[in-house]
Amino acid sequence: MNVSARSAAAWLCALAALASFPVLAQTAAAPAASGITTPVFVLNSLDDTVSVINPATWTETRRIATGKQPHHLYLTPDEKSVIVANALSDSLTFIDPKTAEVQRTIRGILDPYQLRFSPDMKWFVTAANRLNHIDIYKWDGKDITLAKRVATGKTPSHLWIDSKSTTIYSTMQDSDELIAIDLASQAIKWRTKTGPIPADVYGTADDKFMLVGLTGGDAVEVYDVSGAQPQRTKSIKTGAGAHAFRAFGDKRHVLVSNRVANTISRIDLQTLEVVDQFPAPGGPDCIDVSRDGKQILVTSRWARKLTVIDVATRKIVRQVNVGKSPHGVWTLDHAPR
């Protein structure tokens, strides 16, 4: 989520909460990455760089210069490139996920804050967080062509596309809404009010429910989107500043970072209840999970670190220094999404 005037108070609360957590020192005895052999990428939003981390030694090997304010990243359907979206440079940087070499840059993509491919691999979608629109591009396997720019309202934040590639869902960070866009007509189908400062959005495998993290609150809202109009069915208490989701990889659980509470909650998607909690100091943001599901990687936004958590013991086993305001985190050796 980007910084807006409305969400500044929530960010200040997160900074205050950070002071109560000790920062771990890096030690040579910390374990190597579990099930990860390819580079770990961390986007440093305020340094305009990507940290490349060697998971065998947990050291930052170099930083890749990108455009201004890289926030999120996404793998291409052929898995040959990871795309870094540079919001303030209106550009996309393509990086080899195995070698960490920059492959190319596409310019003229207006304010790509969030990005996502449709499951059928025909569409590439970006959310323009500061320009209040969502762009729908055609994808031919190599290049993108703008098909439609959809005016959305205040501050589109995070995106989800259903499994049938029929509907785009997006939160509206500054108007407290969830919207749905029909991919066939490329028009807004509906919008509904949410709790304060909705951020990430996550859909269940059957496309029935959408989960919305409330960064301005302390819960995840659940919406039944199976009918013509959405219905809010539940609020799951997770922790203050509920923000970013990541599937745990077992087809049953999803993780959500609670930026102000400095925790990560594990939600059971069958019962829609919190079943586990992990410490995550420093304003936890984006999450990845090792291929074998034994370690959680999370960016500590306010501490300028990548934090590694052991799932079995629920303990922090490593923190790696990165750049300013680390946001997205990703590795090719991840658990299923």
Image (cartoon, rainbow, N blue to C red):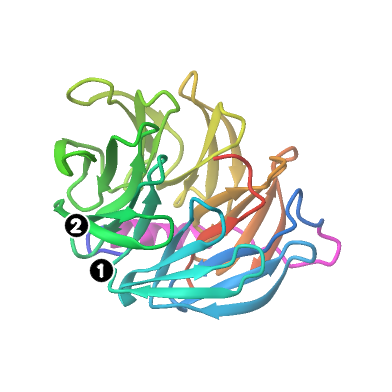
Q: CA distance from mark 1 to mark 2?
A: 9 Å
Residue 45 vs residue 115, the one in the foreground = 115
Residue 326 among those drawn in magenta: no
As drawn, is 95 to the left or to the right of 152?
A: right
Secondary structure at badge 1 equals loop
* Quarter of the N terminus within the rendering: bottom left
As drawn, is 144 to the left or to the right of 119?
A: left
Secondary structure at badge 2 equals strand
Q: Quadrant of residue 204?
A: top left
Which residue is found at the position 35% from the left and 31% from the top? 210
* Quarter of the C terminus within the rendering: top right
Q: Quadrant of residue 312?
A: top right
Tell me the kind of residue under disc 2: His
Label 1 crowd (10 A; few <14 / some 14-19 / many >=20): many
Q: Magenta part of the protein: which range?
A: 8-30
Label 2 crowd (10 A; few <14 / some 14-19 / many >=20): many
Of mark 1 and mark 2, the one earlier in the sequence is: 1
